[in-house]
Amino acid sequence: MTVAADTFVEFVDHLTEALDDHDATGDELAARLHFSRFHFDRMISSVAGEPPRAFRRRILLERAAYRMITTTAPLIDIAVEAGYSSHEAFTRAFTRAYGVGPAEWRRKPGHIQVAAPSGVHFHPPGSLRLPARDKVNSMDLLTRMVEHHVWLTGEMVRVAERLTPEQLDQPIELDVDDDRQTIRSLLSRLIGQMGMWNAALATRDYDWSVEEHESLSSMRERLAAEGPTYLSHVREVVDSGRLDDTFVDALCEPAEVFTYGGMIAHVLTFAAHRRTLVALAFTSHGVEDLGWGDPMLWVAQPATS
């Protein structure tokens, strides 16, 4: 990398560590990185497309937007955390960045990230992300899912040490959700899960009533619409390397922030559970065409267009 690019990386690393150091001046920050203020501002601006001060202010506003969704803290507290001495100053800055005032945005939140030439944004819960250095691709996602599996298995073993031998050996019933599960309800939920996230990404309501004793013909119609739509979301996010980007699910009460990668991992995890129950139920009825629905052979086959 060039000196300017190296300095920008160092600047982002430093900013991550000292985001709440509101007393530090531009001259002090430049000195910490061993540059004059003039040369420091020129180098950062050349790489980031915005001066260091504007870069930091934008990151703090993005964090403030995240706080509005994920906490019930008063706006004045969020303003102070973002480095503003008054609610009025914070409101003016936030409105310039997001197009609406903070109170209105909190009631109806939108995208947290403000457009920026560098593509560096606040990454919940408390870091910054350099796209060129921390790019997440589809293989990285698979690795992370395995890492999560290994970690979670270890945690489960640790928690199991609290149980008695009788509790450890007690049979587990297949019906583990609040409602009694059937092949019909599980299949409807598998489709509905994709439909629910399609609705969240489009900021529209999901009609839960469709899953009430849904017919197979209705399932086929819904799957023909929801399946390709959800798959297109996944492909677009993976192809553009945006698995770590966040989006706001404003349909939750209260609204919540998710990463695209986290959402995909969530869908795969709970879908695997439900598919396994359906496969076991099919087997009990003598239908064994699909076996366990193991994806191993599927992913080994060449993709078809």
Image (cartoon, helix red, strand yellow):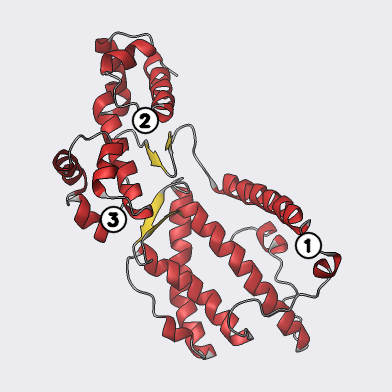
Q: Earlier in the sequence, mark 3 or mark 1?
A: 3
Q: Quadrant of residue 160?
A: bottom right
Between the residue at mark 3 and the residue at mark 1, the CA separation in whole angstroms equals 45 Å
| Mark found first going from the N terminus, 3 or 2 | 2
Q: Callout 2: few (<14), some (14-19), or many (20+) C-alpha neighbours within 10 Å?
A: many
Q: Position of residue 122 (x, y in %)?
A: 38, 39
CA separation in Å, label 3 and label 2 = 23 Å
Q: Residues within 10 Å of mark 1 (few under 14, many from 20)?
A: few
Tell whether label 2 touches label 1 (CB within 8 Å).
Answer: no
Q: Amino acid at mark 1?
A: Leu
- The disc placed on residue 110 is 3
Q: Nearer the viewer, residue 215 or 111?
A: 111
Q: Quadrant of residue 303?
A: bottom right
Q: Nearer the viewer, mark 3 or mark 2?
A: 2
Q: Is residue 116 visible?
A: no
Residue at the location (37% across, 35% down)? Answer: 120
Q: Residue at x 48, y 84 (%)?
A: 211
At 36% from the left and 63% from the top, the residue drawn is 254
- Say which element carries label 1: loop
To which residue does mark 1 refer?
163
On the image, the x and y values in percent for residue 147 come to 66, 47
Left-right relation of 262 to 106: right
The amino acid marked with disc number 3 is Gly
